[in-house]
Image: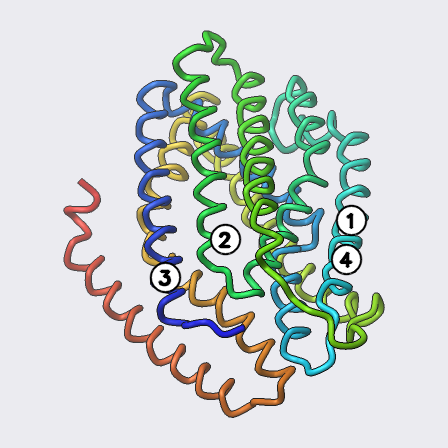
Amino acid sequence: MKRNILKDTILLTVIQMTLDGLALVLNVFLTRQLGTEAIGILTLTASFFRLAALTSNGNAFLCVSRFISEELGKSERDPRAVMRLCIGVSMVLSGVFTAVLLCCAPLCSVHFLKSPALAAPIRLMALSLPLVALTSCVRGWFNACCKSGLCAASDTVDFLVRSVIMLLFVFFSPARTPEGLCHLTAVSMIAGAAAQLLFLLCFLPSCKAERTGRASLDLGRYLRLALPVMGGSALTSFLSSANDALVPITLRQAGNSTAEAFSQFGIFEAIILPTLFFPSTVLCSLAGILITETAREKAAGRSVRITRLTETAVRKTIVFAVFVTAILMMLGRQLGE
């Protein structure tokens, strides 16, 4: 299975930038319709959901992409056995986290989302974690099999389903309470993940990876190699979510009311940060492709190509970073206005 790195990077970048642009437009629309306080609540709830999802499945997308790619690079391989192992570990992890969240929902609602009434949405999120884990595993399979277009298309399906549900809520639901907004976040993300999974499963028969021998990965080696990835991903997600939770608290300590704190947080997280991090889409797309490529080349013993890929990626990343920095410095005032 060969892939054109430049072509796939451009494809993923164009689609992701389009989705990011549409998400920014959607955030602006929701801000005008629901108010900045509601957007702050939605953003904080989504941050909590992402933390729970990523931690519960052990960053299944990255692990599956890496291990399947490595398996495909070997002369004797059984990628489907590796996939079953990855799914099994992810489902066990997500099941444990689901049970923990179901038991600790009242505690999380009080200390993280600052409202005892939000325990019900947290329980709903907890029940969706196995679905999110399975979806991440299937996405990782397609990414490892050089089906970047399908991964990007599935992200589009996920975004469209979530957006439609949010728009239906805006136009037809009179309830704009924090509980209703948190339920909206949970329902939209669950529906998006389910639609994404169904979309990918439709193309699963066309993505064949033949067995030529025994699988090189067992449970012990999987845990040994995946634990650093799981730990790093969980720590990064936790710090990001902790930051999201602390911003409204700090704003309240500075003299703002709860509504004002969520309002300012909503503008910052939903509009300002997406604008600033818009250029990073290119690097995220490239990084996802490089993980699968280097894993496959390492398994095949082609270290020279790994060195060449790394040097090219670093050199072009620096050039791109300087270019984006110059653009932001020259047009910062116009972008802010």
Which amino acid lies under the numbered mark 4 shown in the image of this protein?
A: Arg
Residue ID for mark 2: 151
Tell me, yes or no, if residue 255 can be seen here.
no
Q: Position of residue 198 (x, y in %)?
A: 59, 39
Q: Where does the image place residue 251, in percent across and percent down from the top left? A: 45, 33
Label 1 sits on residue: 93
Q: Residue at x 48, y 53 (%)?
A: 150
Front: mark 2 or 3 = 2
Residue drawn 21% across the image and 43% down it: 336
**The disc label shown at residue 282, or none:** 3
Closest to the observer, 53 or 210: 210
Contact check, label 1 and label 2, Cβ < 8 Å: no
Q: CA distance from mark 3 to mark 1?
A: 31 Å
- The reply to whether callout 3 and callout 4 are in contact (CB within 8 Å) is no
Asked which secondary structure carries label 1, the reply is helix
Mark 2 residue type: Cys
Q: Report x, y in % for residue 34.
A: 38, 19
Q: Residues within 10 Å of mark 3 (few under 14, many from 20)?
A: some
